[in-house]
Amino acid sequence: MDGNRDGGILIVCAANVCRSPMAGLTLRRAFARLPDYDAVPVATAGVSVDGARSVCPEVASFHTSERWRELADLHRSRPLYPEETLQATLVLTASRGIRSSVVAAAPERRRRVFTLQEAVWLGSGFVVEPGTPGMDALAAFQRYIDDHRGLRQLPKRPRRLLPSRQWQDPLDIRDGHVLGAGAHRRTVRTVDESARELASLLTGARPRE
């Protein structure tokens, strides 16, 4: 699932142990059952990786299928290399902050870089033509969401928040590791839901449970 390959999808978070591998596993799981998409490269990396670490247990145990476990066991975190951003057709990040880091390293590819939530939000009207090869559909999707960037209004921050509530950027998926077990589980579920929705937009298939 990881490594330098021309084209395809590159998913980036901070440590590359939770959010990006979860999104990568979910996309590969969705693509595997579609002949036109099973060869679409999906790679993951992190902007602040500290050694080659295994995927977090919450992600590893999210599905019980043998293939999921196999791919999760093979994962080792790795840093993002600038050339990967240059090669990828679509780069997805966990947050705006990480998106900024990726763009700063490869500004000429900024039109290909989105947060995962942003790509789902902007791509809601995308329709893939039946029979379109997976890589062609991916390129068309990238152009579509880039053309619509800034045209869809995001939810606005409430004027007042309760003291116990913290505003969360709708384009971000927070790092649940630092927020406790419950928040960690919610983060993993959110990544899975968003990645499945992205896969359905790209392929024209209904999200797989």
Image (spheres, rainbow, N blue to C red):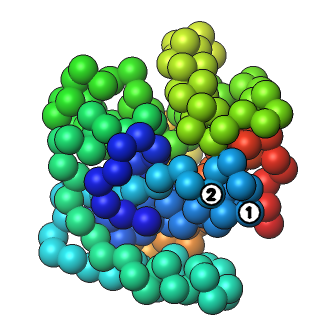
* Tags 1 and 2 touching, CB below 8 Å: yes
Q: Residue at x 41, y 40 (%)?
A: 7
Residue visible at 31% across and 38% down?
87
Q: Quadrant of residue 39?
A: bottom right
The residue indicated by pointer 1 is: 33
Q: Where residue 131 appears, x then y in whole percent? A: 78, 36
Rendered location of residue 180, percent (x, y): 44, 75
| Side of 88 relative to 162 (left or right) | left
Judge by depth and name the residue closer to the eye, 85 or 161: 85
Residue 130 in the image: x percent, y percent?
82, 33
Mark 1 / mark 2, whichever is N-terminal: 1
- Residue sitting at 39 percent across and 31 percent down? 113
Q: Is residue 205 left or right of residue 9?
A: right
Label 2: state its secondary structure.
loop
Q: Quadrant of the N terminus?
A: bottom left
Can residue 143 be seen here? The reply is yes
As displayed, is residue 56 above or below residue 6? Answer: below
Identify which amino acid the numbered label 1 is placed on: Arg
How many residues crowd around disc 1 within 10 Å: few (fewer than 14), some, or many (20 or more)? few
Residue situated in front as seen by the camera: 164 or 136: 136
The residue where tag 2 is placed is 38
Q: Secondary structure at mark 1?
A: loop
Disc sitting over residue 110 in the figure: none
Amino acid type, residue under disc 2 in the picture:
Asp
How far apart are the alpha carbons under marks 1 and 2? Answer: 7 Å
Q: Does residue 169 appear in the picture of this structure?
A: no
